Amino acid sequence: MSAPPGDGGYVVDVRDGRVGTVMGQVGTYVQLRPPGGGLEWDCPPADVRPATPGEALRARVREVNAQARRP
């Protein structure tokens, strides 16, 4: 993939299948964060693909559930 979706878009790290939210790009890596929060990880742009609608929906549900659990 030549360029990941813009910041905030959902992508899949094809190296391990994790879905992440694009947080930005630093150097030659795309920074991804798990839906609902957590530690960011770096991924080469060639190893990300856009999330399918089903993957994006599951990710969004995880984010909403995480927000509901926060005080």
Image (cartoon, rainbow, N blue to C red):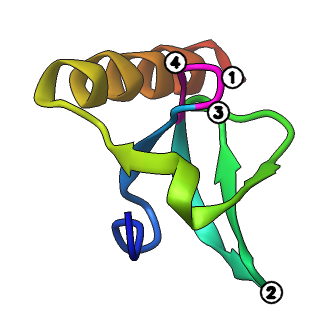
Q: Residue at x 28, y 22 (%)?
A: 55
Q: Quadrant of residue 57?
A: top left
Q: Residues within 10 Å of mark 4 (few under 14, many from 20)?
A: few
Residue type pointed to by label 2: Gly
Viewer-proximal residue among 28 and 21: 28
Direction bottom: furthest residue: 27
Residue type pointed to by label 3: Pro
Q: Is residue 21 left or right of residue 61?
A: right
| Secondary structure of residue under mark 1 | loop
Question: What label does residue 27 carry, if any?
Answer: 2
Q: Which residue is mark 4?
A: 68
Return the x and y of residue 6 as percentages of the image width and height: 38, 74
Residue type pointed to by label 4: Ala
CB atoms of marks 3 and 4 within 8 Å: no
Q: Which residue is mark 1?
A: 70
| Secondary structure of residue under mark 4 | helix
